[in-house]
Amino acid sequence: SYVIWDAGDLEVHAPRDTVQRWSTDPRSRVPALPRLGPDDALPRCRRTVHRGAVIHG
């Protein structure tokens, strides 16, 4: 099973007042996450596949 997302811009971010757990170094292979700010578009599910059958999209 898998889902295909249209997530727009991605970023690696952590609040300054917490321990930095995400590395911005591309070699670290830390996955970027979608931007979820108040002015950013929410990610959209383009397709959902379960056991080989498309159930959405």
Image (cartoon, rainbow, N blue to C red):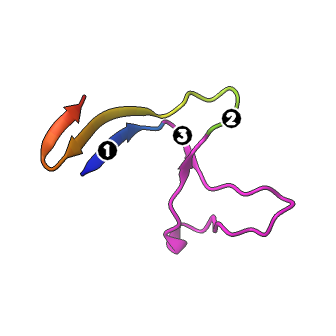
Does residue 4 sit above or below 51 in this rendering?
Answer: above
Distance from the alpha carbon under mark 2 to that under mark 3: 11 Å
Q: Amino acid at mark 1?
A: Val
Tell me the SS state at disc 1.
strand
Q: Is residue 14 magenta?
A: yes
What amino acid type should be assigned to the residue bearing mark 3?
Asp
Disc on the earlier residue, 2 or 3? 3
Task: Tell me residue 37's x, y (percent).
Answer: 68, 35
Q: Which residues are magenta?
A: 8-35
Q: Secondary structure at mark 2?
A: loop
User: Measured from the top left, where is residue 4 in percent x and y?
Assistant: 32, 42
Residue 19 in the figure: left or right of residue 6:
right
Question: How packed is label 3: few (under 14 Cα within 10 Å), some, or many (20 or more)?
Answer: few
Q: Which residue is mark 2?
A: 37
Q: How many marks?
A: 3
Residue found at the far left of this picture: 52
Q: What is the x, y in percent for residue 15?
A: 79, 55
Say what amino acid the circle numbered 2 marks: Gly
Which residue occupies 68% across, 26% down? Answer: 39
Q: Which mark is residue 9?
A: 3
Instruction: Look at discs 2 and 1 and give the one toward the viewer.
Output: 1
Q: Could you classify mark 1 by the number of other residues whose Cα lies within 10 Å: few (under 14), some (14-19), or many (20 or more)? A: few
Residue with the mark numbered 1: 3
